[in-house]
Amino acid sequence: MDSRDERKEGAFPHVMHHGAVQGVTGSAHEWVVSESASVLIDCGLFQGRDTGPAGASASDLSIDFDISRIQAVVLTHVHIDHVGRLPWLFAAGYDGPVFCSEPSARLLPIVLEDAFKLGISRQPEQVEAFLTLLEARLVAVPYEAWTALPLEGESVFVQLVPAGPILGSAAVSCRNSQGQVTVFSGDLGARLAPILRSAQPPYRADCLVIESTYGDRLHEGRAARSARLERALMRAMEDKGTLLIPAFSIGRTQELLYELEGLIHRHRSAPLNEHLDWDELPIILDSPLASRFTRVYRELDDFWDAEARERLDEGRRPLSFEQLLTVDDHDAHQRMVRHLAESARPAVVIAASGMCAGGRIMNYLKAMLTDPRHNLLFVGYQARGTPGRVIQQEGQGGEVVLDGQRYSIALPVTSISGYSAHGDQRDLLDFVEGMEDWPEEIRVVHGDPKAKAGLKAALEEEYQRRGMDVVVCCPG
């Protein structure tokens, strides 16, 4: 399928999908207002085997769709699969503004600096030139306010409301001059996730473009996932090894730190094993990028939820507690890998990348996969074609190829779905049911075929139960 809209040609507004329709990543959706004016919602990297409708992929990130009528970009949040192709969009000739929430405006330059260095150039002058250009294009807007977009000859507005998965996340409502509203969910967070305010459904939508990453399943509750995290940690300590947690630098890492601080606080001074108390357990954050994001999270505590702010009021430091050790430079990282691989020192290591497709987690895996003393814990989605998905599926006793070399998987492998940045089917249904006026058209995107089909069926069942009509389609 190409990027064209599935609705009747000439009908405005309509939506064209340029990514996240044949998989989970590469989010890019165009809200077309007229023949000459449109708004691009997100412009993300493809990961794993995901591809775009016109052929873009993780190995070919050039912009493969017409950008001539795009006059504004609006970002739902700063995960790389939603923003990572912005440098390529600028290179293709887009010279308009980029709108996002206030926290996202703080986080986006960090995300894109890293993406630019990895995908385009590490030359300092080129990196600085790109960041200067980005800062000039960024427009931070407050939640809930309707903001006019500068589309020539058109009167259109957007509204951002909290969406949950990471700091700054937003669902985007787009309204044209006739009052028609198209809503783009972006990623919707799990209910009662730590630190962040829960997703807030918009008032109404005529058309809804909704993600479906976990559209066919339910996550564990927060209490259950916290208990599983504690069990995974205890098992690693009993095995006298390291608990490795591949985690995305933004969102997942901060949630994990928050939960680990909670466990240590609850068990403080109690024995973790015969040699170690809970408050002596080192939590190692081995990711310079994650450390930068964590600092910004701490600075933006005005956007935290009530529970997290209560911890601050009690004098606790949920993202900078005493046992937290950060590893920044590469030499220190190499020494840490060797020390933990060779010793029986219990520790928890959080390192990127979350899908084991690069980053410092790779060195830990190469050093520890073949040693059953250690444990590996996945806390997020593993895309098709990534080493993380292979390790998750193969499990203990299987094999995986890392950088061209085959490794046996001797350590125990555990997954906890509840730490996903994405909400489950119940969260997605709640987003729709929380609207005062439900959409008449729903486009299910951003998911594997089974997940999209599961959410489509659940939505149709809910509408039918209430005697309401809806058209639900799964582009791609």
Image (spheres, grey):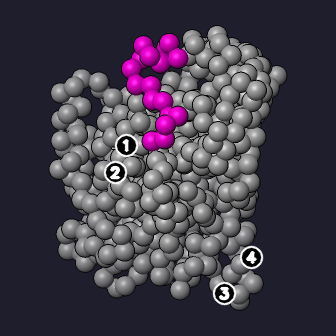
Q: Is residue 429 visible?
A: yes
The x and y percentages for residue 408 are 75, 16
The x and y percentages for residue 464 are 73, 83
The residue type indicated by label 2 comes to Glu
**Mark 3 / mark 1, whichever is N-terminal:** 1
Q: Are marks 2 and 1 in contact (CB under 8 Å)?
A: yes
The residue type indicated by label 1 comes to Arg
Residue that mark 1 sits on: 295
Of badges 3 and 1, nearer the viewer stands: 1
Q: Which mark is residue 299?
A: 2
Q: 428 or 35, which lies in front? A: 428
**Mark 2 / mark 4, whichever is N-terminal:** 2
Q: Is residue 384 visible?
A: no
Q: Are marks 3 and 4 in contact (CB under 8 Å)?
A: no
Q: Please say if 258 is above or below 310.
A: above
Of badges 2 and 3, nearer the viewer stands: 2
The answer to which quarter of the image holds residue 281 is top right
